[in-house]
Image: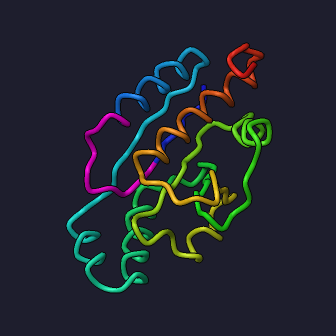
Amino acid sequence: MIKVNIYYIAKNNKDLSTTLCNEFATLCANFGAKIEFINLFSKHIKESQKQEPLEAQKSYTQAFLKVLKQNTYKIALTPNARTLDSFAFAKILQDKGEVAFFIGGAYGLEENFTQNCNTQISLSPLTFSHKITKVVLSEQIYRAFCLLNNHPYHK
């Protein structure tokens, strides 16, 4: 069984994307994967976003560090990282016990935080809202489990 936590920072947590993400999480459960979506938005983050971008990034890092577990494979989503095809993405998830994806807030992630993750990836050179990022990431996680289990979804 693999556990996948998707940590994100967003003001609004209830929308259509939540329904789609939960649908992909349910499909992933068929492969023994448990997917959770955890919004870490807080008053501290809200206040720091009113200051300069670096302060906002620091507040995101602080929130993420509070939830990190030592044996978790950490993946930072950042626009400047490498992009992967679905097969390479699936290999990242292969044989992992617990994986954490980190989606930064409006000002992205601190470079220091991303460098301390096991890997950094970009879903696209485009900038997406959290709603879209969560849906695309959820679908790619499901696609990865299909590929790893020779399920025909990918074809």
User: Residue at left 44%, top 23%?
Assistant: 23
Identify the residue at horizontal 40%, vertical 64% (top origin).
Answer: 105
- In the image, taking residue 22 as reference, residue 28 lies left or right, namely right
Q: Quadrant of residue 126?
A: bottom right
State whether residue 152 is above or below residue 63: above
Please indicate whether residue 41 sits to the left or right of residue 8 in the image. left
**Quarter in which the C terminus is drawn:** top right
Colouring: rainbow
On the image, the x and y values in percent for residue 29 come to 52, 19
State which quadrant residue 92 falls in.
top right
Report if residue 10 lies within the magenta region.
yes
Report x, y in % for residue 3: 54, 34
Q: Residue furthest bottom?
A: 52
**What range is drawn magenta here?**
7-17
x and y, in percent, of residue 115 in the image: 65, 70
Q: Name the residue: 69% across, 58% down.
A: 119
Return the residue found at the far front: 126
Reply above or below: 23 against 86: above
Say which quadrant the N terminus sits in.
top right
Residue 144, magenta (yes or no): no
Q: Nearer the viewer, residue 66 or 26?
A: 26
Q: In the picture provided, is 150 more to the left or to the right than 67? A: right
Labels in figure, total: 0
Report the magenta stretch's main SS. Answer: loop
Quadrant of the rendered image containing residue 40: bottom left
Q: Tell me: residue 155, above or below residue 53.
A: above
- 71 in relation to 23, above or below: below
How far from the left and from the top, in percent, is residue 31?
A: 61, 18
